[in-house]
Amino acid sequence: MMIPFGHALAFAAALFILGLTCVLLRRQILMILIGVEIMLNAASLVFVAASAYWRQVDGQVFVILLMAITAAEVAVALAMVVYLWRRKRTLVADEFNGMHG
Amino acid sequence: MTTALFYILGIILLAATLMCITRRNPVHAVIYLVAGFFALALMFYLLGAPLVAAWEVIVYAGAIMVLFLFIIMMLGLAPQEVPEGPGWQRWLPLALLSASLMACTLLLILEDPAAGQKVGGFYLAPQALGEALFGRYAMAVEMVSFQLLFATIGAYLLGRPLPKGEDQ
Amino acid sequence: MNDSLLFLIPLLPLFCAVINLLFGMRLPRLFAEVMAVTGVAGAFALTLLFWGHAEGDGSRAVLFTWLNSGTVDISFALNFDRLAAPMTLMVTGVATLIHLYAVGYMHEDDDYARFFALLNLFVFAMLAIVLADNLLVLFLGWEGVGLCSYGLIGFWYRKLENAKAGTKAFLVTRVGDVFLGIALLWLFALTGTLSINAINAQAAAISPGVVIVLSLLLLLGACGKSAQVPLMTWLADAMAGPTPVSALIHAATMVTAGVYLLCRFFPLVSLSAVAMTAITAIGAVTAIYAATCAMAQREIKRVLAYSTMSQVGYMFMAVGAGTVAGAMFHLLTHAFFKALLFMAAGCVIHLAGDENDIFKMGGLARRGPVELFWAFLAGAVCLAGLPLTGGFFSKDGILLALFTHPDPLYRVFWLIGVVTALLTAFYTFRLVYLVFAGDYRGTGHPHALPLLMRWPLWPLALLGLAGGLFNLPVFVGGGEALHHWYGTMAGREVAASHDVEWMLIGLAAAIAAAGWLAAHWRYRGYRPPLENPVSRFLLSGWQADALVDRLFVRPFTSMARFCSAGCDRALLDGTLDGLARLVSSWGRMLVQLTTGRLTTYLSAFAWGFLVLLGWFLLKLVNGGGH
């Protein structure tokens, strides 16, 4: 398989923007978190493509680390979702505006 | 043959993600995303990262996304429709913003001289990755493991039952 | 005796003042009083002991180096010379008597420690002026007497008008002090020294134009302290203070400090004919102005206050006419009889039950102790200039100096002096008749007169009546002792034929008698005060306060109001408030950005991302690639 490096990056960029769009447009906290996951995976794709481009191991190592950190992030984030749900019985992000000026 | 496969996988990935972010039902969204991540895992494999591809399936699709599903189930969100989406006045500018971001990014990527360079024909054996991970990057692995420990403790603290009166 | 012990003269009162200031209220009353009197009396005794040191060029004593910076080397030094010695003796002597009197006068007042501390401090400051070897010590004393005067005028500060009178005196004299300060600094800049003698020695080298300006500045400084036109408005109000204060500060010593200052700088001032004429003119104007005012006053102490201004005006005329000896002669006799008059007036007020208005007195010759009447009369004849009294000879000496001055303009001043003498005799006897003659018209209950308020009058009466002996003119058989004592410092030699002198002395006697007769005719039987515009005009001191108010206070107030309301509040505050409001409204606008909503923050984040990407794109387009 031989593809231009740019195409791999373009897929990653498209994936990232889709994740960003999800984060921006969706109002439910759970969907925002899913958007974040999509963006993280786009980053993983860039790492793996770069690893193949430079023929080095480091990119893939970073993907592994990224997954571990994502697991930690998701654990805390979902615990928070549960907590917020218990507080307000809703997951609409705009309802949690206690820090407004 | 594999080249074509890469593009097909890419298109599947994007399509599944698009479906994911437009679903109202979070369960559907997560299922679509898992499908997308399968495609992504195969793309990793094609880019010469078999171990990462395996873990993408195991950790991401298998663990993290299932965790999402658990939460959705636990909170009973699945049958519920999420609240009505905002009017176009709100989402149109944001959609345009996303579109311009996409255009900018693609422009920047394709203008780069490295974009034309070919990638492929690369295969990293899992052994080499493991040696790098527990050799040069051992310290990073340790730190990440601590990170996971802290996250576990944090999640435990957040998940305790609320004191009386704070529950709505 | 050692010259350096000269310091004990001013330091003794200062020491007692400090003790009284710090511990006075805890000491027994008798102790505080005795210490205050002893301090001043000790200074008097020391002055007598040191008298011999003043002969020749005098003695100089350096206590310590005050300032030493580069070429500036100023020591705290005293100069006890022929000019200073009689003044020192007068100040300490009169102050001793007045302190004794004050012990009696204040015996019902609880705040004796503050009173005696300020009085002693005043004596110290006055002695610092008199004995100053350099301008800095002189200025220290100059400001010191002003401070004590302020504190003592407003001594009964619970009454607002007293406190206001003190503030007024302080502020008006301060106007003069500013000019004096300018003069002192200028003199220092010109000569590089602050020593008074050195400055006088170098005076001839200063260019004539500068000498005129310097002399006028010194004159204005003297005017402030001596209540001369145009800085005269404070003295009449200063009578709000206790009577011993009026006697000591506002009659005998402090108000003559201006005269003394001009005498000190006589070698400098006399270089300029213009300045001398200005001094004489100011003296003449004040003399006649104050004399007319005194004719219409109703309060006994205000009459005396205006007469003080008038007499100090004579002293200025003497300095202007070039005779330092004449000025100092009048200064000394005036100090005696005016202190006497004030102290006697204090007794009168006591007897009249704290009544100040002379139209509510009368008959006090019979009501009070008869010796009080004689003491007051002794002061009055001195002030009126009846022949053979001290005031007669000293005033005559001044008129003679004016008459014999080569400049014909001085004849005008002489004429003013003669008219003033007539007015003086008139208002003095008006006072005597209204207070002592006829029947008692008041309602007050007399206070008892303590012994200490009575007998200090006698030495002063004696000194006032016999004061002429200090400087008795040659043609009546005298030796002009004071003139010879001053020697080279005495100023112009007043030379006139004996005929002229006899003519003038006869004229003076006739004028004094005429004034007495006029008062006798007008006030022998009691007549109520005139109520016409002229007397009201004179009563208000020619509306001087209103004039000052209109000329300075109101423009100043309106300027201050403009600065406050226009500049400060509208412009500065407005600008600052506007800026603050602007910033605050921006803040409120920015506050709206912090909605507390996650979506807002996320979209802001995305917009920022777009800007960042746009920037990279722009670089790409501009740079034409990498």
Image: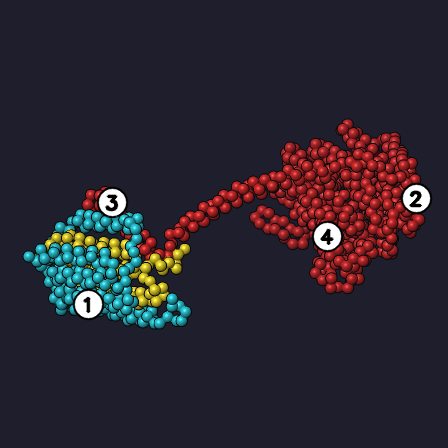
At x 90% / y 40%, what residue is drawn? C526
Cα separation between marks 4 and 1:
95 Å
- Locate the N terminus of chain C and report the quarter of the image it occupies: bottom right
Q: Position of residue C191 (x, y in %)?
A: 62, 41
At x 36% / y 60%, what residue is drawn? A96
Q: Residues at marks 4 and 1, common chain?
A: no
Q: Which residue is mark 1?
A: B62
Relative horizontal placement of residue C126, taking residue C518 as reference (left or right): left
Chain C on-screen colour: red
Q: Which residue is mark 4?
A: C157
At x 22% / y 60%, what residue is drawn? B29
Between C100 and B114, the residue placed more toward the observer is B114
Chain A on-screen colour: yellow
Q: Residues at marks 3 and 4, common chain?
A: yes
Cα separation between marks 3 and 1:
42 Å
Is disc 3 in contact with disc 1, using a CB cutoff of under 8 Å?
A: no
Q: Amino acid at mark 1?
A: Gly
- Mark 3 vs 2, N-terminal side: 2
Relative horizontal placement of residue C266, taking residue B141 as reference (left or right): right
User: Which label lies toward us, 2 or 1?
Assistant: 1
